[in-house]
Image (tube, grey):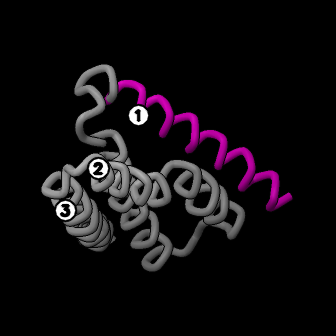
Amino acid sequence: MTYLLVFFGGGLGAALRHGINVAAFRLFGPAFPIGTLFINVTGSFVMGLIAGYFALKGDLSQNWRLFLTTGILGGYTTFSAFSLDAILLWERSETGLAILYVAASVILSLVGLVLGLWIARSFG
């Protein structure tokens, strides 16, 4: 049963990730991987909210935890795509953009997680 929860959650997260990447590509073009950056930051933020909720409340089952974190967020967040995007920028000799992308992804994702935890704790 738990594998099915992760499977369905992962499919939902991956479909959402794909939709955001398509929209970002159409809106902003291919010069900078803004879709992946957005996904990593928002995924980290939501992970902070969920982790904070489970730490404070803990009243949802392990099945919900697996569905939401391993499933949906596991399918949604894209640090493997992040790595590829960073290297592609570097290989195109866009070193400044590659550095900006890596720094922004890491820093803003950490800030997103801390903000999510803070919000979850504020309402707990």
Q: Is residue 95 magenta?
A: no
Which region of the structure is painted magenta? 1-24
Q: CA distance from mark 2 to mark 1?
A: 17 Å
| Residue labelled with disc 1 | 21
Please tell me which of labels 3 and 2 falls first in the chain.
Answer: 2
Q: Nearer the viewer, residue 8 or 83?
A: 83
Q: CA distance from mark 1 to mark 3?
A: 20 Å
Q: Nearer the viewer, residue 68 or 83?
A: 83
Q: Nearer the viewer, mark 2 or mark 1?
A: 2
Assign a secondary structure to mark 1: helix
Q: Is residue 103 left or right of residue 68?
A: left
Q: Position of residue 102 (x, y in %)?
A: 26, 62
Q: How many tags in the picture?
A: 3
Q: CA distance from mark 3 to mark 2?
A: 9 Å
Q: Residue at x 57, y 34 (%)?
A: 15
Q: Position of residue 64 (x, y in %)?
A: 65, 60
The crowding category of the residue bearing disc 2, from other C-alpha atoms within 10 Å (few below 14, some 14 to 19, many at least 20), is some
The crowding category of the residue bearing disc 3, from other C-alpha atoms within 10 Å (few below 14, some 14 to 19, many at least 20), is some
Kindly identify which numbered label has been placed on residue 89: 2
